[in-house]
Image (spheres, helix red, strand yellow):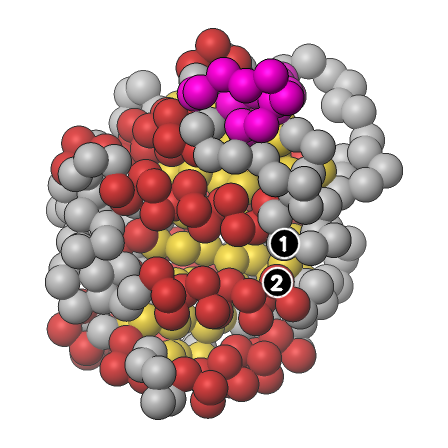
C-alpha cells in the first residue's frame, strides 16, 4: 500500500460499554488495505477511510487543523448507538496521512484506496481533512467503476471550489481539477453545488461554473418555502446519473452548528435542510460514496462539529436496506 497509509487502530474507538454491543465502538472491524488481497464482499459494506491532510487548506489560505479531523470524528462516532436497522458492523480502513505537506502524494494514496474499496464491494465514507479530498475521491471512483459510468457530484458547500491551482492544487481547486481530469479541456462534468453563497465566491468562479454547466443551488433557496423546488431540482440532477458521489464541506453549515471548520460563517445552511437533501439522495439508490470535509477539531466547541458529522454518517448507516 501507499507510503502515506496508516493502518486502522481499533484502540482509538471508545465509548460506553454494553452487554449487547449496542454502540458503534463495539462493532468496528479493521480493514488493513496493506494486507492484500482484500476480500471481495457479496453485500455492500460501509467503511470509513480517513484523509488526514490539511496542506491544501493552508495553500488556500485557510486555517489549518483539519488533518486531525478523522481521529476527532472517530472519537465521537464510536459513542453513537448501532440500531437494529443499521449494518451488522462498520469497517475502519485507516487513514492516508500527509507528514511532509505533499498533498499530491496523499491524494494519490487515498485515490488508490477508494479504487480498491469500490472494486471490492464497499461503500466508502471518507473523512477529511481539507476539501482537496474531493479530487482524490473522485479519481478513485473513476478508476474503480466501469468505464462509461455517468458519475455525478453533489457538493454541499458555501464555496464552488473551482479555483485554478496557484500554481499548486489546493482545497479550493478540486472540482476544476475533476472537470479537466485526463485532458486539458473539461470532460463530461456533472456537478451540483448546493448552498453556494454570493459572499463566498468571486465573480470569476460564478463565470467558470456557468461555462462548465454546473447546477447551482444558492443558500437563499434553502428555506422551507422554496425547499420542495430545490429537492425536485436535485431529483432532476440525479435522473441523468448512474452513480452519485456526495461530498459535504462542513463550512457550508452555519457556524452556530459547525464552528470547527477551516472557513466558518454564520450565513450557512442548517442541519435540518441538509438531512432532507440527504434523504432525497439516499432514496435515489444512486449514492455510491460520501465524504465529509474540513472538520477542524482545533476550533470546535464541545465537539459539536464532530457530532454533526457523526450524525450524518449515522443517518447513512441506518438508511433502510442500504446495507
Instruction: Say if the magenta span includes residue 159.
Output: no
Q: Tell me the mark number nearer the camera, choosing from 2 and 1.
A: 1
> In the rendering, at what x and y percent does residue 292 appear?
41, 47
Which residue position is annotated with label 1? 319
268 or 262, which is in the foreground?
268
Q: Secondary structure at mark 2?
A: helix
> In the rendering, at what x and y percent does residue 250 appear?
31, 52
Q: Name the quadrant of the C terminus.
A: top right
- Residue drawn 75% across and 43% down? 44
Which residue lies most toward the right here? 42
Where are the magenta residues, as a range? Answer: 15-33
Residue 69, located in which quarter of the rendered image? top left
Classify residue 38 as left or right of residue 110. Answer: right
With respect to residue 49, does 222 lie above or below?
below
Which residue lies most toward the front here? 19
Q: Taken as a whole, is the magenta stretch helix, strand or loop?
A: loop
Instruction: Say if the magenta span includes residue 27.
Output: yes
Q: Is residue 64 visible?
A: no
Name the N-terminal-most of marks 2 and 1: 2
Which residue position is annotated with label 2? 282
Residue 206, located in which quarter of the rendered image? bottom left
Numbered circle sitting on residue 248: none
Classify residue 149 as left or right of residue 157. Answer: right
- Residue drawn 30% across and 65% down? 270
With respect to residue 174, does 243 lie above or below?
below
Classify residue 277 as left or right of residue 294. Answer: right
> In the rendering, at what x and y percent does residue 178 appear?
48, 58
- Residue drawn 46% across and 86% down? 228
* Disc 2 and disc 1 in contact, CB within 8 angstroms: yes
Separation of residues labelled 2 and 1 (CA atoms): 7 Å
Q: How many marks?
A: 2
Q: Secondary structure at mark 1?
A: loop
Amino acid at each position: 500500500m501507499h507510503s502515506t497509509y496508516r493502518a486502522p487502530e481499533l484502540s482509538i474507538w471508545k465509548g460506553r460499554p454494553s452487554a449487547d454491543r449496542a454502540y458503534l465502538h463495539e462493532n468496528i472491524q479493521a480493514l488493513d488495505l496493506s494486507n492484500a488481497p482484500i476480500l471481495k464482499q457479496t453485500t455492500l459494506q460501509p467503511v470509513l477511510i480517513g484523509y488526514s491532510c490539511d496542506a491544501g487548506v493552508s495553500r488556500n489560505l485557510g486555517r489549518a487543523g483539519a488533518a486531525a479531523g478523522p481521529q476527532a470524528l472517530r472519537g465521537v462516532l464510536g459513542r453513537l448507538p448501532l440500531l437494529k436497522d443499521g449494518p451488522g458492523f462498520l469497517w475502519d480502513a485507516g487513514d492516508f496521512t500527509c507528514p511532509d505537506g505533499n498533498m499530491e502524494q496523499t491524494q494519490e494514496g487515498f485515490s488508490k484506496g477508494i479504487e480498491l474499496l469500490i472494486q471490492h464491494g464497499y461503500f466508502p465514507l471518507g473523512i477529511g481533512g481539507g476539501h482537496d479530498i474531493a479530487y482524490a475521491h473522485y479519481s478513485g471512483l473513476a478508476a474503480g467503476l466501469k468505464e462509461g459510468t455517468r458519475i455525478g457530484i453533489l457538493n454541499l458547500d458555501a464555496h464552488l471550489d473551482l479555483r485554478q491551482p496557484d500554481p499548486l492544487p489546493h482545497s479550493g481547486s478540486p472540482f476544476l481539477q475533476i472537470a479537466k481530469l485526463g485532458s486539458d479541456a473539461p470532460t463530461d462534468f456533472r456537478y451540483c453545488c448546493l448552498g453556494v453563497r454570493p459572499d463566498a465566491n468571486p465573480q470569476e468562479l460564478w463565470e467558470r461554473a456557468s461555462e462548465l454547466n454546473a447546477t447551482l443551488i444558492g443558500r437563499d433557496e434553502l428555506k422551507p418555502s422554496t425547499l420542495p423546488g430545490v429537492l425536485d431540482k436535485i431529483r432532476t440532477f440525479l435522473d441523468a446519473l448512474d452513480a452519485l458521489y456526495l461530498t459535504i464541506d462542513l463550512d457550508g453549515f452555519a457556524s452556530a452548528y459547525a464552528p470547527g471548520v477551516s472557513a466558518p460563517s454564520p450565513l450557512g445552511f442548517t442541519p435540518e435542510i441538509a438531512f432532507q437533501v440527504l434523504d432525497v439522495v439516499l432514496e435515489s439508490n444512486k449514492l455510491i460514496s460520501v465524504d465529509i470535509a474540513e472538520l477542524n477539531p482545533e476550533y470546535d466547541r464541545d465537539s459539536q462539529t464532530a457530532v454533526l458529522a457523526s450524525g450524518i454518517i449515522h443517518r447513512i448507516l441506518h438508511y433502510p436496506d442500504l446495507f
